[in-house]
Image (tube, grey):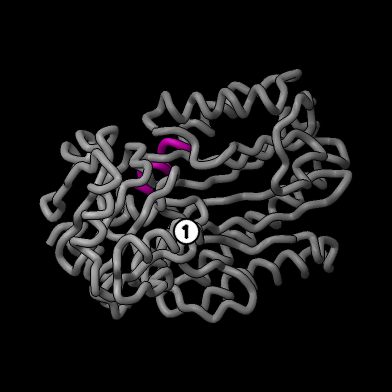
Amino acid sequence: MTSVSKRLRRVFENSDVDIALISNTKIIDTNFLYLTGFSRGVFEVTQLVATRNKVRLSASPLDYDTAKRARPKEMDVSQFDTSDDFVNFLKKNLEGKVVGVNARFLPYKTYENLKRLSKAKQFVDISDALEKARSVKDESEIYNIRKAVAVAKKALAEIEAQLKEGATERQIADELDLLMFKNGGNGPSFQSIVCFGETSAAPHHAPMDIKLKRNSYVLIDCGAKYNAYCSDLTRTFIFKPERASAKYKRMSEIYDIVKEAQELALEKMGPGVKASAPHIAAAKHIDTAKNGKYKGTFIHTLGHPIGLEVHDMGPVLAPGNNERLEPGMVVSDEPGIYVKGFGGVRIEDDVIITNKGAKFI
């Protein structure tokens, strides 16, 4: 059974519909990539209809040839040249049927037009079924995520070696993105975050023209795409440390606490574990370390799913989340300590849940 066949089966196992419709607008619904296996292409206004064992596409002349070349064996591809062709495709496949749609993506106006044009019996939201299917990755997805992680790791190692006094956050971010391309990635999976010194205390800091100085933090959060799949890694360095200084000793102390928290969280991950448990373990360690010196400085959730989107579908590692982790899920493990006016440390790796536990990719 091919990847596409398995994915169709997973979607329909969790939804009671006759057919599924994924409708791209001017941007691609990532579920379109999931159900086609495509990794590249524009595919504006392309319509995908799926049964339990077949996918049919209706593409404009701009995307038709691309779809024909990349299609898996379970896919039929047709071309619409006029609005009548578009409507006929919808009616032929959807009229009188119960149709599942991704209501989390579909704009209301587009939804109303599709209902009117298709003559479907009923439209049903299957976004939960799509999320459940996508939360557990198959072998090809894990392969692509591993490659995306390898690209980002190599770029991070190379950029660390290039750090020099006077470089700006913006310059390093631009060079990092270029390195991810050079190392085989299809581009960054999100806007790279580069922080020097005090700006590392802002988790979502946007790179600026701040210059790098000695004995200061460098926090870099980046990810690469490989065949449309994402990675998400964060590294924190101390640039040219002055080891005898009180500032360095505090920076090093914070780093060690965060690293310990990350490892404790990893130990808590595994099949059947509540998604809240790893976060609780990391937060408890940070809050109690050094007699509570850094209590309350871990200000975000521990992690999120990773896949076709950098914040993909599946359980978030957060307090109060009683969803259970399953083998094949891929999540980030990214505790942090953020001290305003001083700086912050975040260490992030991507983790795969296995039958026996969990491990860094």
Position of residue 238 relative to residue 314, above or below, is above
- How far across and down, in percent of the image, does residue 226 sit? 37, 40
Report whether residue 22 is seen: yes
Observer-nearest of 122 and 226:
122
**Residue type at tag 1:** Phe
Q: Is residue 164 left or right of residue 161?
A: right
Q: Main secondary structure of the magenta part?
A: helix
Tell whether position 361 is magenta.
Answer: no
Span of residues in magenta: 144-152
List the residue tagged with mark 1: 105
Position of residue 340 relative to residue 185, above or below, is below
- How far across and down, in percent of the image, does residue 77 sit? 17, 47
Q: Quadrant of residue 151?
A: top left
Q: Quadrant of residue 124?
A: bottom left
- How far across and down, in percent of the image, does residue 12 sit? 26, 73
Position of residue 358 relative to residue 172, above or below, is below
Tell whether position 150 is magenta.
Answer: yes
Where is the N terminus found, in terms of image quarters? Answer: bottom left
Residue at the spot 31% in from the left edge and 42% down from the top edge: 39
Observer-nearest of 350 and 300:
300
Q: Is residue 314 left or right of residue 96?
A: right
Report whether residue 326 is seen: no
- How far across and down, in percent of the image, does residue 121 sit? 30, 76
Element marked by disc 1: loop
